[in-house]
């Protein structure tokens, strides 16, 4: 599958879609626009972000925020409090354990259960 | 990290380099040129291929070969016999379990132990 084509089928922001699985992890695509992702933590689960298009502002508690651009990859280790946002539309690939909730320990109006990410 | 920049540090073909980990899986980068990857199988482990640059010929036993291009993603499920090749240089990202050998059940002159992929 081509990721750019696959992304055309996604219209909602902050709503990850599972596009594949590698044993215990899901591969997901998402579109981000705005700052609705809350500060959150995944206790023990790492989470990979890869930028397909656009720019993503990455914030980690007690660190300088940094901007991710197309082709950039970053892995947040488990236990690290973080949030992401983007003024303009940004397209990302996520790699997460099958058990990982995209908003971690926080439930807000963008929180999407895994079953609705399929 | 930027994947294109990271790839400039890789000079050998068929020699995956681990660039990160998401719990039980490794994220790897590799350059492919030629057809040295043998037909092989990973008994139970899935393997993800993502094309960063160039084209990859993907062959699966008893199926029509297909060509992967930039931005394409394909997951080979465990137990499926496959091989990849490329006439011109091709840059890929691999996502594999930490236990996965890149040439699966086959050992040949390109086989690189996990400890040498770091």
Image (cartoon, coloured by chain):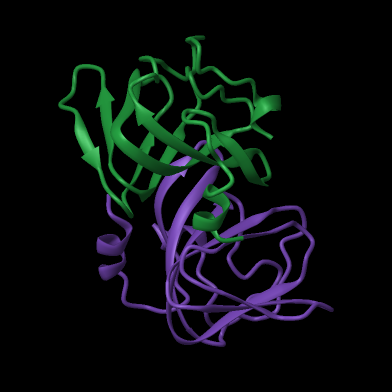
Chain colours: A green, B purple
Q: Is residue B46 left or right of residue A94?
A: right
Image quarter hosting the N terminus of chain A: bottom right
B22 and B98: which is toward the camera: B22
Name the residue located 40 percent from the left edge and 15 percent from the top edge.
A40
Quarter of the image holding residue A34? top left
Above or below residue A60? Residue B46 is below
Picture coordinates of residue A31, whole percent (x, y): 45, 37
Q: Is residue A18 left or right of residue A48?
A: right
Residue A58 picture quarter: top left
Residue A99 placement (x, y as % from top left) = 63, 25
Judge from the rendering whether residue B93 lies leftward or rightward of residue A75; answer left or right. right
Q: How many marks?
A: 0
Residue A52 pos. (x, y %): 40, 51
Residue B83 x/y as whole percent: 66, 77
Name the foreground residue: B73 vs A34.
Answer: A34
Question: B32 or A53: which is nearer to us?
Answer: A53
Q: Quadrant of residue B80?
A: bottom right
- The answer to whether residue B48 is above or below residue A84 is below
- The residue sitting at 36% across, 50% down in the picture is A53
């Amino acid at each position: 599958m081509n990721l750019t084509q696959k992304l055309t089928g996604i219209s909602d922001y902050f709503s990850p879609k599972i596009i594949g699985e590698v044993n215990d992890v899901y591969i997901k695509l998402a579109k981000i626009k705005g700052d609705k992702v809350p500060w959150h933590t995944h206790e023990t689960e790492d989470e990979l972000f890869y930028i397909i298009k656009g720019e993503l502002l990455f914030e980690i508690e007690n660190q300088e925020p940094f901007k991710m651009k197309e082709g950039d990859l970053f892995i947040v280790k488990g236990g690290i409090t973080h949030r992401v946002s983007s003024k303009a539309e940004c397209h990302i690939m996520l790699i997460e354990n099958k058990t990982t909730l995209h908003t971690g320990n926080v439930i807000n109006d963008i929180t999407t259960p895994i079953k609705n990410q399929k």
